[in-house]
């Protein structure tokens, strides 16, 4: 595994006799384990200690599986080093939307409180097979519906760069935990921006793969035609490695095809000969000016690396939000119908008949945003409304797919800010769903078209992270990650949030 | 058969038939398809609708469904997709059924149905589509056996996810009897295809009916959907009751309401289901977890080529190959196992006429009396052929053969052995018979004299007397010949020489 070392980025520091995990990438963890400098148990303990230290401030985890993680780490240590796979013993944390056999999986919803899946999601099985250590389950917006993680039924996760602000969502727990160094990397899911937007707001790398690159089996469905599992990590290389671990055709998911070529280790250092289209519709008037300033510096960096950038108008993308808020709730209204109190999860007590059981279980079990979307979706699919809403939204989707296809005839990649704004204050948008929905304006069209999209830390505005979104053609992950790697090296943005300092400041107030 | 539509009315009937496919595994998961197993022993996260699971199409089920569609003469579009049919019910774990909607597997087929009077009616097949079955509910307590009023209900998901094919006919049927005949012949066709057990009692064949009435020539009346008819007889009776209900309502100046009507097999009556469950908007939309099915022309051609002989073709062949009557051939062709039995038997005996008489006579009588399929008939064609051979060779009479047949069925013994052990063997010993004839003629000098004067009819009196003496075991043909010769003086007691060649 020579050549994969990133020791320059991740010098191991002895910190109070322990390991300073704030300096560790997943590759660094792997090197430490391979060289025998630390054992899997030591590494796992270091992350558990970090979680114990900062989780009170961040609130990223719904469940920390200390016993399970240590047992798995011991099993790795018991194996001769030469018989281990390359990633054995490296810890990871999982969004609580992924089924892990024997570990409570709630989707941050009361309706699934206490639900313990009898099976592993395919991605979980792959990571388990690869020997990764599961630290626990991460907070999220209930059933992945939201952009701030405030829709969790259980806790509010805080942005490690500013504890009064949201981490984004719905994979807010995943982004915050990586930014706070509670895990070297994490898995999230992205239906309309749920990996990229929190990655942007928390200043980490987040990748939504091409629809079909990663199996959805065991990912609790929100909107089946849009959902995709992907990595959140500190570096592009870590994200590439995690994608490689989870991607692939799965016979249990008919919509999965895997990747046409291995992602490999991103190592491109320039962008010569590459054409970048700057999406005009996601510029001025849509994004905060401070965000556009940071974005502008990223564009300059791309050009400095030899890339060619020019503005491209893609008018159909403006309709993405409207189409998305028909299609996603429609599918969700059907996907979430199974939570009926009959077989698992929450059942309202003391019901007199079936109808009452349905109504009360679902009324008490779901939060307001989930109910809102179930109602929108049910309405949109109803007899007499289907053509005006669902069918029309699908036609819009087709237009967006075509417009992307045309653009990729001229450009290698399309770029925009990932989020129109930096992280907003906790509670700021709770009462205004449309303002909340606006957070995903730039990311939603990518899901509608099934394209791969990556958010890369591009810098800071008002001391808060700003992400650069890079969109590639279908199954272009290898090229996309290579381009992102070059930009990442040029921008050299700090990814470890000063969460301990913030927590200390907060404690002193 | 006594049901007559009221004067001046016409019924319009269309059927929706559900056929459970006998694939090894379920429609969208790897669980085994079973019947009568302990509850919830053939289930997995997929067919229990756990969070996060995804369906995967059973290719065998698609092949079986394509067989049905092709056998019904359907057109199979180049692209077919699944839809979700959304509704809440405890036996439906995902709260949607994966089914097909506007792009079904097969469309525009037809089945020509042969009615009892020899006429035919062509029934259009609107669509043939694939879907998954629901689980089964058991309601404890409460008077109705239904979920309303039950103390509690239990769900068994063993059946959940079993592959189903739904066949929807055009409203081409006009009488309950036609509907019953159609279903019988459709059942036979599907059975022939080897894709289902088509057992109505076990639910592997289920039928709902849409029915309306009108004055002939007028536009279609309001239809109702008739459910819960789990036998051919109930289908006919349910339709009769519902048609009568509708006509009486209309004649009383009332309206027929479009609703679901339940048939109660115990009382033979129908009652409308008016409940909250009825206000369904299924909110169909394309199933995003599955990709479209595209069946190539080559694939379909292979299936078409490998279709077994279908009942209509078999009927023709049975008439031509075995010289059967149209009615005999039709009876056999629409009863696959009986036709198979007949063909085996005719093959062994080499005598299709005698074979068909046995199969449609005593064999069918036994099967009907015991509610058996010919596939489960306890006597092999070889053993029945042995019995037939005993008759043909004159060792036993046809009358005795029926007794032996009964004995074979009750004891399981071979025909030869029964004949041997019970002394049922036909008396074809000329010496013994002449001895009896001598005795009988001597006892009745009057009739003997009448015969000699030319009254041929008296012969049958003497045959009867000889049969009586021999307890029916005498070879009747031989007795006839010997009597004629004896009475006309060509034969004297104990002089068998001349008749040896009769044996």
Image: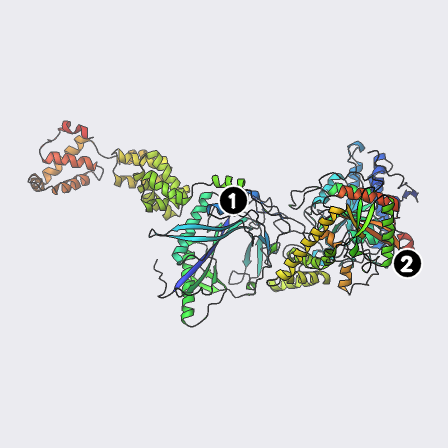
> In front: A484, or B377?
A484
Outermost residue toward the bottom in this view: B253
Please state the horizontal and vertical placement of residue B278, each as a whole percent of the image.
55, 63
The answer to whether residue B277 shows anywhere in this view is: yes
Closer to viewer: mark 2 or mark 1: 1
Please state the horizontal and vertical placement of residue A33, each as a whole percent of the image.
84, 37
Q: Give me the residue at 67% from left, 45% from top.
A: A256
Outermost residue toward the top in this view: B497
Q: Residues within 10 Å of mark 2 (few under 14, many from 20)?
A: few
Residue A506 bears which disc, if any? 2
Q: Give me the residue at 87% from left, 55% from top.
A: A293
- Position of the C terminus of chain B by quadrant: top left
Instruction: State whether discs 2 and 1 lie on one chain.
Output: no
Please state the horizontal and vertical placement of residue B266, each as a whole percent of the image.
43, 60
In the rendered image, which quarter is residue A88 located in? top right
> In front: A409, or B270?
A409
Q: Which residue is mark 1?
A: B64
Q: Is residue A9 above or below residue A337?
A: above
> In front: A418, or A292?
A292
Residues at discs 2 and 1 in contact (Cβ within 8 Å): no
Chain assignment, label 2: A
- In the picture, measured across the screen, residue B41 lies left or right of residue A198, that is left
- Position of the N terminus of chain B by quadrant: bottom left
Tell me the SS state at disc 2: helix
Please state the horizontal and vertical placement of residue B443, each as a whole percent of the image.
10, 39
Chain assignment, label 1: B
Q: Residues within 10 Å of mark 1 (few under 14, many from 20)?
A: many
Q: Give me the residue at 55% from left, 58% from top.
A: B139
- In the picture, measured across the screen, residue B261 lies left or right of residue A261, that is left
- In the picture, measured across the screen, residue B352 lies left or right of residue A382, that is left
The answer to whether residue A472 shows anywhere in this view is: no
């Amino acid at each position: 595994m020579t050549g994969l070392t990133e020791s320059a980025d991740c010098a191991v520091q002895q910190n109070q006799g322990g390991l300073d995990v704030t300096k560790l990438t997943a590759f660094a963890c792997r090197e430490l384990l391979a060289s025998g400098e630390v054992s899997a148990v030591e590494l796992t303990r270091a992350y558990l200690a970090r979680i114990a230290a900062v989780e009170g401030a961040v609130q990223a985890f719904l469940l920390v599986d200390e016993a399970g993680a240590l047992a798995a780490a011991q099993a790795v240590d018991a194996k001769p080093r030469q018989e281990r796979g390359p990633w054995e013993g490296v810890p990871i944390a999982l969004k609580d939307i992924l089924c892990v056999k024997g570990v409570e999986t709630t989707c941050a919803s009361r309706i699934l409180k206490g639900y313990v899946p009898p099976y592993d999601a395919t991605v979980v099985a792959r990571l388990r097979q690869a020997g990764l250590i599961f630290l626990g389950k991460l907070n999220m917006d209930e059933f992945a519906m939201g952009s701030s993680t405030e829709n969790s039924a259980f806790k509010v996760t805080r942005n490690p760069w500013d504890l009064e602000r949201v981490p984004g969502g719905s994979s807010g727990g995943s982004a915050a935990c990586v930014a706070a160094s509670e895990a070297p990397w994490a898995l999230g899911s992205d239906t309309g921006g749920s990996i990229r937007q929190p990655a942007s707001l928390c200043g980490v790398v987040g990748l939504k793969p091409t629809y079909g690159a990663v199996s959805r089996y065991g990912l609790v469905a929100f909107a089946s035609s849009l959902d995709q599992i992907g990595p959140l990590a500190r570096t592009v290389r870590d994200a590439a490695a995690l994608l490689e671990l989870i991607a692939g055709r799965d016979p249990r998911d008919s919509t999965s095809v895997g990747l046409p070529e291995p992602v490999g280790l991103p190592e491109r250092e320039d962008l010569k000969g590459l054409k970048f289209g700057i999406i005009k519709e996601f510029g001025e008037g849509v994004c905060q000016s401070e965000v556009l300033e940071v974005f502008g510096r990223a564009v300059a960096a791309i050009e400095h690396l030899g890339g060619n950038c020019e503005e491209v108008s893609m008018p159909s993308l403006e309709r993405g939000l409207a189409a998305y808020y028909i299609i996603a709730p429609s599918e969700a209204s059907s996907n979430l119908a199974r939570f009926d109190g009959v077989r698992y999860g929450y059942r309202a007590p003391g019901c007199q008949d079936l109808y009452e059981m349905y109504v009360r279980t679902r009324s008490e079990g779901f939060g307001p945003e989930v109910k809102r979307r179930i109602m929108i979706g049910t309405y949109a699919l109803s007899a007499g409304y289907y053509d005006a809403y669902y069918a029309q939204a699908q036609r819009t989707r087709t237009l967006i797919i075509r417009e992307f296809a045309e653009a990729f005839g001229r450009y290698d990649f399309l770029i925009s800010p990932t989020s129109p704004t930096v992280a907003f204050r906790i509670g700021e948008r709770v009462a205004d769903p449309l303002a909340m929905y606006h957070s995903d304006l730039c990311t939603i069209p990518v899901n509608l078209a099934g394209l791969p999209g990556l958010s890369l830390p591009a810098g800071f505005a008002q001391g808060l992270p700003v992400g650069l979104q890079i969109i590639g053609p279908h199954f272009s992950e290898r090229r996309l990650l290579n381009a992102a790697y070059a930009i990442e090296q040029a921008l050299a943005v700090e990814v470890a949030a000063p969460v301990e300092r913030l927590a200390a400041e907060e404690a002193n107030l | 058969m006594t049901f007559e539509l009221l004067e001046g009315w016409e019924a319009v009937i269309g059927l929706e038939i559900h056929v459970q496919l006998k694939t090894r595994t379920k429609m969208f998961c790897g669980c085994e398809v079973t019947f009568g197993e302990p509850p919830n022993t053939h289930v997995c996260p997929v067919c229990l609708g756990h969070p996060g699971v995804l369906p995967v199409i059973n290719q065998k089920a698609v092949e079986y469904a394509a067989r049905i569609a092709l056998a019904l003469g359907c057109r199979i579009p180049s692209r077919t997709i699944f839809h979700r049919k959304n509704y809440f019910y405890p036996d439906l774990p995902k709260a949607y059924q994966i089914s097909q909607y506007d792009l079904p597997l097969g469309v525009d087929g037809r089945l020509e149905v042969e009615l009892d009077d020899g006429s035919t009616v062509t029934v259009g097949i609107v669509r043939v589509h694939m879907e998954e079955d629901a689980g089964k509910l058991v309601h404890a307590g409460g008077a109705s056996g239904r979920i309303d009023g039950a103390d509690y209900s239990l769900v068994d998901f063993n059946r959940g996810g079993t592959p189903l094919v739904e066949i929807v006919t055009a409203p081409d049927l006009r009488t309950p009897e036609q509907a019953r005949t159609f279903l019988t012949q459709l059942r036979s066709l599907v059975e022939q295809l080897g894709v289902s057990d088509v057992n109505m009692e076990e639910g592997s064949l289920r039928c709902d009916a849409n029915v309306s009435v009108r004055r002939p020539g007028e536009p279609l009346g309001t239809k109702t959907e008739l459910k819960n008819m789990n036998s051919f007889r109930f289908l006919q009776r349910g339709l009769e009751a519902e048609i009568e209900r509708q006509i009486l309502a209309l004649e009383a100046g009332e309206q027929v309401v479009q609703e679901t009507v339940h048939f109660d097999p115990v009382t033979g009556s129908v009652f409308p289901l008016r409940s909250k469950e009825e206000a369904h908007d299924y909110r169909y939309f394309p199933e995003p977890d599955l990709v479209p099915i595209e069946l190539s022309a080559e694939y379909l051609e292979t299936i078409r080529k490998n279709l077994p002989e279908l009942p209509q073709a078999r009927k023709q062949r049975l008439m031509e190959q075995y010289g059967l009557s149209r009615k005999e051939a039709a009876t056999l062709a629409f009863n696959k196992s009986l036709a198979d039995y007949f063909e085996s038997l005719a093959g062994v005996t080499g005598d299709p006429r005698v074979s068909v008489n046995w199969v449609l006579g005593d064999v069918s009588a036994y099967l009907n009396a015991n509610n058996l399929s010919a596939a489960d008939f306890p006597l092999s064609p070889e053993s029945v052929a042995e019995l037939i051979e005993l008759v043909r060779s004159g060792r036993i009479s046809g009358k005795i053969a029926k007794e032996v047949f009964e004995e074979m069925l009750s004891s399981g013994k071979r025909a030869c052995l029964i004949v041997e052990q019970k002394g049922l063997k036909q008396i074809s010993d000329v010496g013994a018979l002449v001895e009896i004839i001598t005795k009988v003629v001597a006892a009745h000098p009057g009739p003997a004299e009448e015969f000699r004067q030319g009254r041929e009819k008296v012969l049958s009196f003497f045959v009867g007397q000889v049969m009586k003496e021999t307890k029916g075991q005498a070879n009747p043909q031989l007795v006839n010949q010997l009597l004629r010769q004896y009475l006309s003086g060509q034969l004297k007691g104990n002089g068998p020489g001349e008749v040896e060649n009769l044996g």
